[in-house]
Structures are given as structure tokens and as C-alpha cells.
Image (tube, helix red, strand yellow):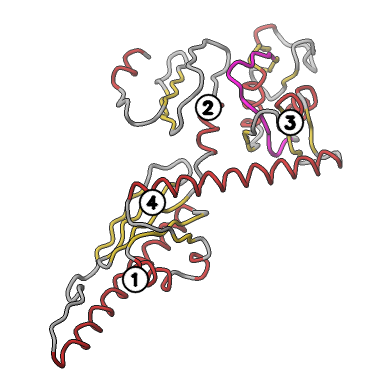
Amino acid sequence: MDDTVADLRHNDGASVVLLQAPGEPTFVEFLDAAIDHQLAVVDELARLGPVLESRQQSVPHVMVVADRAGADLVGIGAMVEPVEVDVEGDTLHLHRGHPGGWSQRRFQQRAENQWESNAAESATAVAELARKLDARVITVAGDVRAVGFLLDHLPTDIVELAKKLDGQSVDLIAEETVRTVADIVARDTRALLERFGEEHGQGRAASGPSATLEALSAGRVDILLVHDDPTDDRRARFQRSGMWCALPDTDPPAPEPSEAIRDGRLIDVAIRAALLGDAEVRFVPEHSPPDASIGALLRW
């Protein structure tokens, strides 16, 4: 792992996670956000929480900076590298001038037509990228007229995702895009916690470690909700070759050889069982439901 760290480009992220299993290549993932606690640990299970939580913070989206010659597009999707697209339209008759005389109106109209043609080409590229990434929002900024033409040419289902931003500075546009994405993530989390409250009242959600691990063992979990505090050292038991998991004082459902039952950190054991059971894992703020920072929405 030391050799891997020495070869990393340290400006590729605000923090980095490295995971190493015996005999396997080192897993490396940079995170956009800084982490509060530096941590090195050896345990039965990898700490996937920081990686999964970081991915949760970036919903698929497209950022567009348009000018009269075309547009620059950046797309961020789930589990894919950022996609960059440059659209360059025809620059002939692009700039409106003041030639004077009878030709001025015709010259200006040809320029307007070319701006719109370039915007239509850009709109096609935006729609294709948004659909490819299953984007949830498209931020659009740049030249006022170019932005207007581009929005006019976006398909109905795509223009509904568009959010027009002020300004033409790429840095400011990027900052506003990050805030827009963060707002979407926050709304998703609020909606999920509201749903948890409703479902728990009707017996369709588990709250707390014991009930949640029991539901995970049975494959009943649809969405696991956890708050992953790196200082949380609660433990749980898990079956190495299956999904069974429980609190430390719980015996497995059938006699098992001692090497078949392992001990791991509670949150990591729960995440492992959720992934094995094809359940979604969602991270929630501290002091929010469910009880003891762990719970689940159930399939049945």
C-alpha cells in the first residue's frame, strides 16, 4: 500500500480510500470531500462506508457552458468517469456586425440563424449525454442568447431537467452546480427519512441493530439506512459464506465450524449483508432516525 500511495496524484481528490485484501490489487478511490478522521485499520471486513457515501453525494448530472459557437459539456454519471463533450458549430457569419447600408439587416439575420443552428446542435448533444447518464439535473450557463436558443431546442423531457444559472465564469458555474447536486441529495435523504417514519409505523421498516440484522439475514431489506461514524466500534457476527448476521451474543441458526463465523464491525457487517442481498445502502445524518444509527426499509 505504501508503494501505491507513493504513485498517486495527490491532487486528484480531497481525500483517498485504499483497501487491500491478501493477494489482491489495492483498491483506490479518491473522494471529492475531505474526511474528518484519518484511519488505518486491519479487520475482517473492509470499511466501504466512506466510498459508498461519497458516491451517494454525486447524482448523475450534466453541466453546460454555451456560447454562440457551440457548447462545452461535462457529464457525471454513476460509476463512470466524467464525460467531456465539446460542440463546435459553424462559425461562418457568427458575429453580428454593423456593415451599414442595405445589407446590415440580412447580415444580422444570417448571424442569428447561425447562432440558433449551433444551439440546436448543442441541444442534441446535451440530450444524448443526459439520457446516456440518466441525469437528474442539467445546469446551463453562458452567453444569454446562446443559452436561450439551446433551451428552446431541448426535447421536452430534457428541458424539464434544465436549471439556468447566471454568469459565465466556469469556476462559479461549477460551484453552483455542486450546490445544486447537494440540494438534490439532501431532498432525497429527507424524503427517505419521511418514508422510513411512515413505513416504521406500519411495520414495514426495521429500526436498531437487532431488528435490522435479522431482516438482513432473511433477505428482507430493500434499503439499508446507516450513519457511519468512523469511531463507532460496535461489533457483530456474520457467516463467512452466507448472509446471516447478528449481534455478538447471538448463536447462528445451525451449528457451524468456528472458522465459518466471523466477527466484524457492526456497520460493515450490515453493509456486507445488504450488498449480498442486492439491497440499496443509504447514508443518513447523525441523530436522525432510525434508532442507533441503523435501520432498513423492508421488502415484506
Q: The disc labelled 2 sits on which kind of residue?
A: Pro
For the residues bearing labels 1 and 3, Cβ distance under 8 angstroms = no
- N-term-proximal mark, 1 vs 2: 2
**Mark 1 and mark 2: span between their CA atoms?**
42 Å
Mark nearer the viewer, 1 or 3: 1
Counting residues from the N terminus, which is met first, the one under dot 3 or under dot 2?
2
In primary-sequence order, the first of circles 1 and 3 is: 1
Residue in the picture at 37% in, 72% down: 149
| Residue span colored magenta | 221-235
Q: How many callouts does the rendering have? A: 4
Q: Are marks 4 and 1 in contact (CB under 8 Å)?
A: no
Q: Earlier in the sequence, mark 4 or mark 3?
A: 4
Q: Is residue 186 above or below residue 16?
A: below
Q: Secondary structure at mark 1?
A: helix
The answer to whether marks 3 and 2 mark residues whose Cβ atoms lie closer than 8 Å is no
The residue beneath circle 4 is 173
Describe the element under mark 3 as helix, strand or loop: strand
Q: Is residue 229 magenta?
A: yes
Q: Position of residue 291 (x, y in %)?
A: 77, 27
Residue 42 pos. (x, y %): 52, 10
Which amino acid lies under the numbered mark 3 shown in the image of this protein?
Gly
Which residue bears the numbered disc 1? 145
Q: Are marks 1 and 2 in contact (CB under 8 Å)?
A: no
* Res 50 label: 2
* Residue at position x 40%, y 53% in the image: 63
Decide: few, some or many residues near mark 2? Use Cα within 10 Å; few <14, some 14-19, many ≥20.
some
Q: In the rendered image, which residue does mark 3 sit on?
A: 295
Discs 4/2, front: 4
Specify few, some or many for label 1: CA neighbours under 10 Å numbering under 14, 14-19, or 20 or more: some
Q: Nearer the viewer, residue 282 or 13?
A: 13
Percent x, y of residue 298: 76, 38
User: What's under tag 4, amino acid-wise?
Assistant: Ile
